[in-house]
């Protein structure tokens, strides 16, 4: 499978490692708005983000991945590109552990040593980062980012666009609504509403944005 990586920052380096861990994948292009025109260097295409359609014209069996950690920007780029979900790759590192009953959406990336357990459901364009644990029956929305070392225990629900910080823990049956932020190292024992930031152990809400403010 040929892969176009959209984004050329730090997160794209980790995406590159996932691709290199699987012999079925091959990077053929990087798209980022630091490039004004499409050029080829050492057999690799480089160009602006909106050159996606041109890349589709160049290759068969082509898939895209948005290699940007910021959930809001990732969603914005998906909207700009207006591609079908079938045009996006689901990338899973060869050292990740995935239950056969787990469901993972298109455009989602799963990093090394992440664990996704029985009957978990991961949406589109999510990031399950290094050593993160998504336990049984979790429901993770689109454009979510589960940071390195975070643990979501059983039957947790995480709404679209939410960011779970590094090494945070969420106890069973908790619901975290859309576009919220859980700070690094937090322990979440209560539900968190939409557009809130929660930190600490136990996690407490320190900020609530107006709806649509994310």
Image: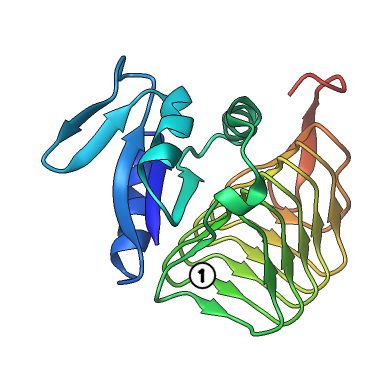
Which residue position holds label 1? 114
For residue 145, above or below residue 101: above
Q: Is residue 206 left or right of residue 71?
A: right
Q: Is residue 209 left or right of residue 63?
A: right
Q: Indicate how the structure is coloured in the image.
A: rainbow
For residue 24, above or below residue 130: below
Residue in the foreground of this view, choosing between 207 and 37: 37
Q: Is residue 179 left or right of residue 133?
A: right
Q: Position of residue 204 (x, y in %)?
A: 79, 42
Q: Position of residue 115 (x, y in %)?
A: 56, 74
For residue 14, above or below residue 10: below
Image quadrant of residue 80?
Answer: top right
Residue in the foreground of this view, choosing between 151 and 178: 178
- The residue under the point 26% across, 36% down is 45
Q: Quadrant of the C terminus?
A: top right
Q: Would you say residue 185 is visible in this rendering?
A: no
């Amino acid at each position: 499978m040929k892969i176009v990586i959209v984004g050329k920052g730090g997160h794209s380096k980790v995406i590159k490692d996932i691709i290199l861990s699987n012999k079925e994948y091959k990077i053929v292009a990087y798209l980022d708005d630091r490039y004004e025109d499409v050029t080829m260097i050492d057999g690799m295409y480089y160009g602006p983000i909106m050159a996606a359609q041109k890349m589709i014209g160049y290759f068969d069996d082509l898939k895209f991945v948005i290699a940007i950690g910021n959930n809001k920007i990732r969603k914005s780029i998906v909207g700009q590109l207006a591609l079908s979900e079938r045009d996006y790759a689901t990338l899973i590192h060869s050292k990740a552990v995935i239950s056969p009953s787990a469901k993972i959406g298109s455009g989602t990336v799963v990093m090394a040593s992440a664990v996704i357990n029985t009957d978990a459901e991961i949406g589109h364009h999510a990031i399950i980062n290094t050593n993160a644990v998504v336990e049984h029956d979790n429901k993770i929305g689109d454009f979510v980012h589960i940071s390195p070392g975070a643990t979501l225990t059983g039957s947790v629900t995480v709404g679209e666009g939410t960011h779970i910080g590094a090494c945070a823990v969420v106890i069973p049956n908790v619901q975290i609504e859309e576009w919220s932020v859980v700070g690094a190292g937090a322990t979440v024992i209560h539900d968190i509403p939409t557009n809130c930031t929660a930190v600490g152990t136990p996690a407490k809400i320190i900020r609530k944005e107006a709806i649509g403010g994310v």
